[in-house]
Amino acid sequence: MAVNNFDLANLALQSILPNNEMLFDDKGMPSVMVKIPKMTYAQLGLGDSTDIHPAFIVNGVTKDAIWISKYQNIVQGGRAYSLPGRDPKASINFDSARAACTAKGAGWHLMTRAEWAMIALWCLKNGFQPKGNNSYGKDSSESIYRAIPTYYDSGKVARVATGTGPVTWSHDGTPAGIWDLNGNVSEWVGGIRLVKGELQIIANNDAAMVNADQSATSSAWKAIDATTGALITPDGSGTTSNSIKLDYVSSHWQWDTTISSSSDSSRNCSFESVTCSANIAAAAQLVLQALGLFKYDNTSGAYSGDYMYANNGAAERSFYCGGYWNSSGNAGVFYLGGNGVRSNTYAPIGFRSAFYEA
């Protein structure tokens, strides 16, 4: 198909869904993307601050918008694409997922935790938690709706074709939204990790830069000061003084400055039951909340039963989000897995690319 035909298809797409757009990589190949204009903390339900959410700050520059893949991505020719009606790429490790995104050219990147959190916070603020394929081809709360199967697990429907579920599987409940953020395959996200339970991030949305170093030994990784919320240089052992760390207390995760219960295994609790100790000051709590790592809304049931999994004993653990086809009611936009080895190639893990104008 010639590029001008792609342009006509893009015009048709935008005439129906104005915030959707076909964006082209440096080889002229399209992906269907959803444009998200910049938003403040207040617009995302995080108090009254007019500061711009970090998802829109890349290398010190505030971006007017970012584009998120409408669909979980496939891989063709070593590049990531957002297209409807496809079996999403799975069994891919963190670094390969990143490489498939950055191969597309300037501005393209693996969706970051800052971007994912921004979408999740928007959903919470607007009172809509998207459903999805979290129970073998359907949502655990829906008995009728189905999507087109693309992969089976022990004879049961596992993955489904991108965007083929009902409109309740869109992040805003409309055809214009981002599909499958709840279930189908969990999605790797960049710019965040745990090191022996210490939370480390890459500043703002700098993980979106094509040359961002997210290797295990990168100096871009920073710990977070539990008093001020400022980024600090980690000591390399997960024991940085006064940094935010993840402890496991009374069967739930708790953000603290020390770890009383460390384990090189996966443990979990509901996102709603995650707490902060008195050592985590308000400024640091806001950093966690902006990254979707700690609740802001204390209304019971606000987070739809989503779960948080983590490993606070390993040398490094990467993050994935959303849940997969067998996560049941634990899946959703606040579902978080901080227990992934970056080399994992499990069938339930895929990814999604994003874009900003460089």
Image (spheres, helix red, strand yellow):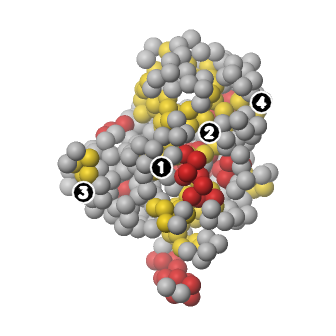
Q: Earlier in the sequence, mark 2 or mark 4?
A: 2
* Mark 3 lies on residue: 145
Q: Earlier in the sequence, mark 3 or mark 4?
A: 3
Residue type at tag 2: Ile
User: Which dot marks residue 192?
Assistant: 2
Q: What is the spatial separation of the Cα atoms under label 3 and label 4, in whole angstroms?
A: 47 Å
Q: What is the spatial separation of the Cα atoms under label 1 and label 4, in whole angstroms?
A: 31 Å
**Residue mark closest to the camera, 3 vs 2:** 2
Q: Earlier in the sequence, mark 1 or mark 4?
A: 1
Q: Earlier in the sequence, mark 3 or mark 2?
A: 3
Q: What is the spatial separation of the Cα atoms under label 2 and label 4, in whole angstroms?
A: 14 Å
Q: Earlier in the sequence, mark 1 or mark 2?
A: 1
Residue 247 at what x, y percent from top left? Answer: 55, 19
User: What secondary structure is marked by label 3?
Assistant: loop
Horizontal side, residue 221 vs residue 278: left or right: right
Crowd tier of the residue under label 3, counting other residues whose Cα lies within 10 Å: few below 14, some 14–19, many 20 or above: some
Image quarter hosting the C terminus: bottom right
Horizontal side, residue 59 vs residue 11: left or right: right
Residue type at tag 4: Ile
Which residue does the image show at 41% across and 43% down from the upper left? 346
User: Which dot marks residue 92?
Assistant: 1
Q: Mark 1 touching mark 2, by CB under 8 A?
A: no
Residue type at tag 3: Tyr
* Mark 4 lies on residue: 232
